[in-house]
Image: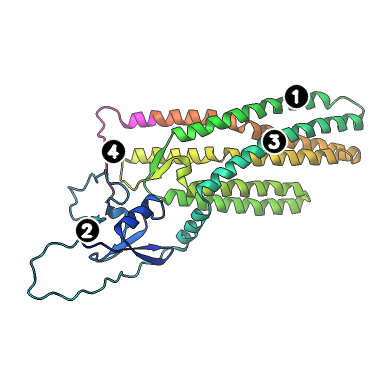
Amino acid sequence: MTPVDWYFARGNKQMGPVSSVDLKRLAVAGELLPDDLVWREGLAEWTTARSVRGLFDEESKPADAEQAPSKPVVALSQGPEPVAAPEEPAPVAKAVAPRAPARHPMEVLLDSLRSAASVRFIEAMARGARACGLYGLLGAMVLVVAFTAIMILKTGTLGELPSGIVLLLILVVLQYVAGKFFDILDRLNRASGGSLPSTALCNSVALLSMVVGVAELFGSVEAAVQASMVLIILGGIASVIVHGYLACVALNPATLNISIAAAEGDPGEEAISVLMFLLKALLRTVPVVFGVGVLGGTIVMGAACFQAFSGAEGRSSAQMTASAARDVLIFSAALPFVAYLLFLLFSLAIDVCRSLLHLPGKPDQSAEQDIV
């Protein structure tokens, strides 16, 4: 059988030729996506990779295959059709692939970002943020003790002692709880999964997240200039980091144990898959929000200690700054435990919705499907 040469389009560039085996390898490795365009000799025009039978999923079959026999199905490996021997051999011409259609610039940008933000990078960033948060809480405890001692010395009263002791105890407990529940959140992420029909939602969430992060950064800079408070910029920086990480997670749904399977299923099941993707994407950002929030709160608490040395007016500002730092630290430290409870609650709601979608007597439209 004559080997088949395949061409594919990537980043507005035509690639190939490659063999059927190499094309399958590219699909398995994630270097060829279902929405990418492919072509081989014998096809009138370019077609999506998902229409190549056996390239992504060999076990499924489209439910409407019998009702729509006219839909083109391309085989991954196809030799020449048997024909009667001609009287004279026809000249053999080298196959030339037609030019691939231009891709949207946003798709080219997202593909570049997806390659840069690999799964290894996402995992490393989550581990680093988690460590920064846990050790940052230890530093915050030291600063709480320092601030309480400074205020007692400067005011000559014990007014700050009770609140300082309570805050210290809260941070000690939350630091222990956060370390335990991070492992539980990782287990829940691995134990739950799903699939999306395309990368459209992933790309949209990534773009929106990046836009929101940049907008909040510029907003914080403007607010800092108007209020003459440099610390306000910390909120914008934290927003850029968190939203940038969320964009990376959305572009790599494999980190959420969610696959891309371009199958036409029940709309209710698709809605559940979308909700699960959004829920798990937010859950995946918890370590980064935790680490960024704790570091930000620790920095603000350090600024409060510095302000406490600036006379009576400075001590008043220091108390306001320390109050803001306390709120940020408590919220950030409690986030892993709160996220665990919310994830269980929403998971239970999703399971209830799924059971309602498959009540007895309701036609099941989620039959096994194949991508053609």
Please report whichever mark, 1 or 4, sits nearer to the chain's N-terminal start: 1
Q: Amino acid at mark 1?
A: Val
Q: Amino acid at mark 4?
A: Ser
Using the numbered discs, state the Cα–Cα distance from disc 1 to disc 3 in whole angstroms. 20 Å
Residue ID for mark 1: 166
Range of residues picked out in magenta: 353-370
Asked if residue 246 shows in the view, the reply is no
Q: Are marks 3 and 2 in contact (CB under 8 Å)?
A: no
Q: Are marks 2 and 1 in contact (CB under 8 Å)?
A: no
Residue ID for mark 3: 135
Is residue 31 shown above or below 272?
below
Q: Amino acid at mark 2?
A: Gln
Using the numbered discs, state the Cα–Cα distance from disc 2 to disc 4 in whole angstroms. 30 Å
- At 65% from the left and 46% from the top, the residue drawn is 238
Q: Amino acid at mark 3?
A: Tyr
Q: Secondary structure at mark 2?
A: loop
Using the numbered discs, state the Cα–Cα distance from disc 3 to disc 4 in whole angstroms. 48 Å
Using the numbered discs, state the Cα–Cα distance from disc 2 to disc 1 in whole angstroms. 73 Å
As drawn, the residue found furthest toward the front would be 1
Q: Coloured how?
A: rainbow
Residue ID for mark 2: 78
Asked if residue 4 shows in the view, the reply is yes
Residue ID for mark 4: 366
Q: Would residue 118 be found to the left or right of residue 135 on screen?
A: left
Please report whichever mark, 1 or 3, sits nearer to the chain's N-terminal start: 3
Q: Is residue 311 magenta?
A: no
